[in-house]
Image (tube, grey):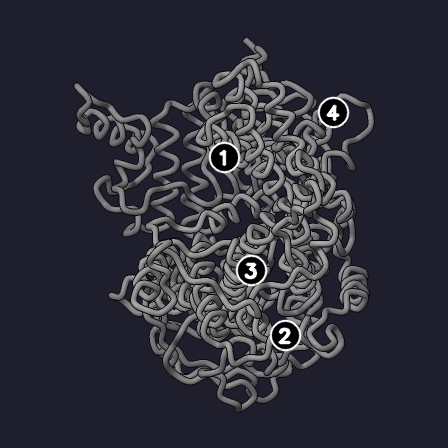
Amino acid sequence: MSNLRKSLSSMSASLVAILAGLVAGFVILLFSNPANAGKGLLTILIGGWNNGMKGVGQVLYYATPIIMTGLAVGFAFKTGMFNIGATGQLMVGGFVSIYVGVTWTFLPGALHWIVALLMGMLAGMAWGMIVGVFKALLNVHEVITSIMLNYIALYGINYLVKNSNLFDSLRNQTVNVAATAVIPKAGLDKIFYITKGRLNDVSSVNAGILIAIALAILMYILLNKTTFGFELKACGYNRHASRYAGISENRAIITSMAIAGGLSGIAGALMYLAPASGLHIHMEEVLAAQGFTGIAVALLGMSNPIGIIFSGLFIAHITVGGFYLQSLKYMKEIIEVIIGLIIYFSAFSLLVRDLIAKAGKRRAKKGNQPSKQEAVS
Amino acid sequence: MSDYIIEMLNITKDFPGIRANDNITLQLRRGEIHALLGENGAGKSTLMSILFGLYQAEEGEIRKDGKPVQVRDPNDANALGIGMVHQHFKLVHNFTVLENIVLGMETTQHGMLRMEEARQKVMALSQQYGLLIKPDALIEDITVGMQQRVEILKMLYRDNEILIFDEPTAVLTPQEIDELMRIMRSLAAEGKSILFITHKLAEIMAVADRCTVLRKGKYIGTVDVKSSSPQELAEMMVGRKVDFKIDKEPAQPGESALRVRGLSVEGSHGDKKAVNNVSFDVHKGEIVCIAGIDGNGQSELVYAITGLLPSTGEIKLNDAAIDHQPIRKRNTAGLAHIPEDRHKHGLVLDYDLQQNLSLKRYKTEEMQRRGLIRFDKVRAYAEELIDRFDIRSGQGPVTSARSMSGGNQQKAIIAREIDINPEVLIAVQPTRGLDVGAMLYIHEQLVRVRDEGKAILLISLELDEVFQLADRILVIYEGEIVAELDPKQTTPQELGLYMSGSKRQEVHA
């Protein structure tokens, strides 16, 4: 089968999974407030468009970190590793970029945010690399190491922030980064806004979404066009055969986890290099949700970097749609449940793909044609 | 009552891109030994999997005693009295023989195991059919031959009447094969009906009453073995006249290409060395064959030479020490390896054919530029190999390796390994599970590589292959080389004695 057909079958599987998720979400809507259920489903489906171009901008804004963590999970998965530690890598990356954003004010303005972003990436890489080193040299399973490192990151950062000049004790969060360290708007504020009276209500979207899309394309090229990607995927599919062919499995594991960590680190930097009105690291005992959402994004996107752009946008879309559900008198918790359900069902896309393949075979059998083409899916 | 205990009528089964069984009919008489003969990919395994309930046929029906039946899963098969000895035994290694036999059919009282009854039944069956076992020994401690008898007893314990043997002689010594033939005859004499899947004609001639031949998924015919000949069966199987012997000139050994001295590999359980102080040479222009029963250190010896397992001792390739080199260095120094397990080591099954063919070449100047793979070159190279080695697949270079037949997967590996133009080619069971046609082809290729002055180390469990190809035979037993033999001056029986450890000689490299 051609690659195009393969992608089409993957895509239709993802769409069917999404549809199933929406049906499940609708059932919950019916139970909690039947009168508004239809309107509620519509609100979720419309997503960002509920609020014009600003809403669309918000979708892009929420999509940015989860596309990055989706890439982090998907990339590691292609190498045969389950990176459940995206959230820890994200927080470490975010923390280091905040540190640079607050303290390295000696940097010239145009460079400041770039350096902060790169340092966040390096921190995430180091955090991810620990997982790879433990797996490669000591054969410790990556899930164990990354779960533990998630908590080490959470509490370690809380400790470091509280005992440094990064702590805003009034708001129990990190202080604002310097204005030069904020991710620039790159002209997106000229597109994504709505006019309220005489003022423009501007969306939070910034250059981060462009960076995320560019990195997704870069990851696609790395995985599919380079000898390096060839080796990484070979290790993911069959590490014995890779070793036999002379590929260093240990090196592949460590580098792929470092790259995955770097992608998560960038996610953190893009989240927290924000203006005063934007995100800060709160001193709470909660792991960043964007890290886990990345798993769903990667699954829905079938670990394909280009697919991950779209699945990230979709999940951001329904998340933003969920915000507007509150105007229909749905409780915030119910909205979380519905969004969670849709994401959960979406992750079934692999299962759906198999079902579609089977149905195709059955159809082919009924017809008199030999099933040569259609059964292959 | 019908003449036939089991009938598979007009069975058709499709897989993606291929019709594995095309209108196949197989009728098994009560109390007969019925051989099922066919090349690799002919559809034997698929047909048996349908009978055993692992696959569902698209068309056709199965009849037991003349009545149509449904076999949806192996439990249905078991209820119909169908039992199977798989090529790779399905035994729990740290359970005893008795526990393995009763597993899934335990006799219990108030939820507690009652092994005594089971033991009596097993021992009675063992005596009735002359199946010698040690009921309380652990599976991992008994010989392969006894493991096979345990598998047979498992079927008898379940009162199966139809016994399927899938390539049962592949792992046995000549002496054990004779024993198995005797057991099969006694089972048939007691009224059991036997389906015997094989590609060894001599065994069919020795034991089978009738033989059904498949070729490329199609039914070719069923013949009475007594009124047939190996030549006729081979022709039916391959579809043309076959010549069993390949032309092979006497070897012209040159200088040593692979030199192994005092090589040892630790065993996986830490008690005994898997390879113990082994020394030998393989010279340019000769095929040295390591003969032995499976599990006597052959795999570990190969892994040590190729770098997949750590070892102590000296390994030299054309006088350069390679024993501390990483795997890729050994490969580029001129070591090629046709691995024992083509799915584990030989192929990345989720990669397509062209990616697999370039698995050891993607880093060469020709195939990449600044780290970017040159897909046009990869494809052109794959097309060339496909053409030259006649590798058949559904979609050419972009066929998923997983969807290819075993024979063509093996051809792809052999094409890749021969084409890197090695100094030393290590071939481990290169024809395992392959049909006569593919086997002959691979043998010819190996001889051709030898005649080009390359050194070949062949590891084989099949004595036919050993005698066909070897210029020199080294016998391995429990990790040690126990004999060096000239194939022209020895017999399979004598070789069997060395392989089973009953005889040994002093060997000096």
Which quadrant: the C terminus of chain A? top right
**Could you tell whether B412 is left or right of B388 in the image?**
left
Secondary element at tag 3: helix
* Mark 1 residue type: Gly
* Mark 3 residue type: Leu
The residue at which mark 4 appears reads as A363
Residue B79 position in % (x across, y down): 44, 19
* Mark 2 residue type: Ala
The residue at which mark 2 appears reads as A110
Which is more foreground, mark 4 or mark 3?
3
The residue at which mark 3 appears reads as A270
**Could you tell whether A368 is left or right of A163 in the image?**
right
Give the letter of the chain under mark 4. A
Dot 1 crowding, Cα within 10 Å, few <14, some 14–19, many 20+: some
> Are marks 4 and 3 in one subunit?
yes
Residue B51 position in % (x across, y down): 56, 27
Taking the view exactly as shown, the residue that stands out farthest to the front is A198
Name which of mark 4 and mark 3 comes first in the sequence: 3
> Are marks 2 and 1 in one subunit?
yes
Which quadrant: the N terminus of chain A? top right
Q: CA distance from mark 4 to mark 3?
A: 48 Å
> Are marks 4 and 1 in one subunit?
yes
Which is more foreground, mark 1 or mark 3?
3
- Relative depth, front residue between B44 and B364: B364
* Mark 4 residue type: Arg
